[in-house]
Amino acid sequence: MELSGLGALIILVGVITSTITGIILNKYHKYVLMVRISAIGSMIMLIVSSYAVYLQDKLFIAIALVIAAVCLIPIIPVGIDFASELTFPYEETVVTGFILMSAQAFGFLLSLAVL
């Protein structure tokens, strides 16, 4: 599989997983459980991906990256929705804007620290 195909597959799987996660959250409202699953799954996949790169097996790397996308990509909508639930009296747009603004500022400061 080419690298561009793998990237497209990772994005597609991540979007599908985010959609399924959103449907589950709307039905059961288990935000903490979803955050924990995503965090633990991401940690496990970080370890597995490090091992996969060490092995240099292309199929194993591809499978590890797709599973990592299943764990990692849904954390963005889950986190934003969970923050909106925690800060109920405020409008959802205000909370989402603050979260995204804070992420941009933190990313900028982190990029300066890395240089």
Image (cartoon, helix red, strand yellow):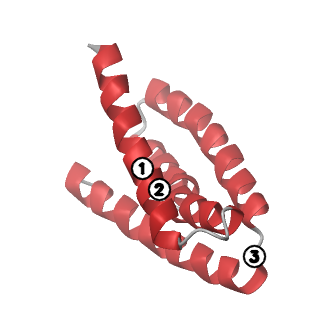
Where disc 1 sits, the SS reads: helix
Q: Position of residue 33 (x, y in %)?
A: 78, 60
**Disc 3: CA contacts within 10 A as few (<14), some (14-19) or many (>=20):** some
Taking the spot 51% from the left edge, 47% from the top edge, the residue there is: 64
Q: Earlier in the sequence, mark 3 or mark 1?
A: 3
Residue 104, labelled with which disc? none
Lateral position of residue 8 relative to residue 76, left or right: left
Q: Amino acid at mark 3?
A: His
User: Which mark is on residue 62?
Assistant: 1
Identified by mark 1, the residue type is Ala
- Which mark is drawn over residue 29? 3
From the image, state whether disc 2 or disc 3 is nearer to you.
3
Above or below, 23 relative to 15: below
**Residue at 52% over, 71% down:** 92
Residue 79 screen position, x and y as percent: 59, 58
**Distance of label 3 from label 1 (alpha carbons):** 32 Å
| Image quadrant where residue 86 sits | bottom right
Of the 4 image quadrants, the one containing the N terminus is: bottom left
Q: Is residue 45 left or right of residue 10?
A: right
The answer to which of marks 2 and 3 sits earlier in the sequence is 3
Q: Nearer the viewer, residue 80 or 11?
A: 80
Tell me: 48 left or right of 96.
Answer: right
- Which three-letter amino acid code belongs to the residue tagged 2? Val
Residue 9 vs 28, above or below: the answer is above
The answer to whether 81 is drawn above or below residue 51 in the figure is below
Q: Name the mark nearer the viewer: 2 or 1.
A: 2
Classed neighbour count for the residue bearing mark 1: other residues with Cα under 10 Å, few (<14), some (14–19), many (≥20): some
Mark 2 vs 3: CB contact within 8 A: no
Q: Based on the displayed image, in which of its 4 quarters is residue 109 positioned?
A: top left
What residue is shown with label 2?
Answer: 66
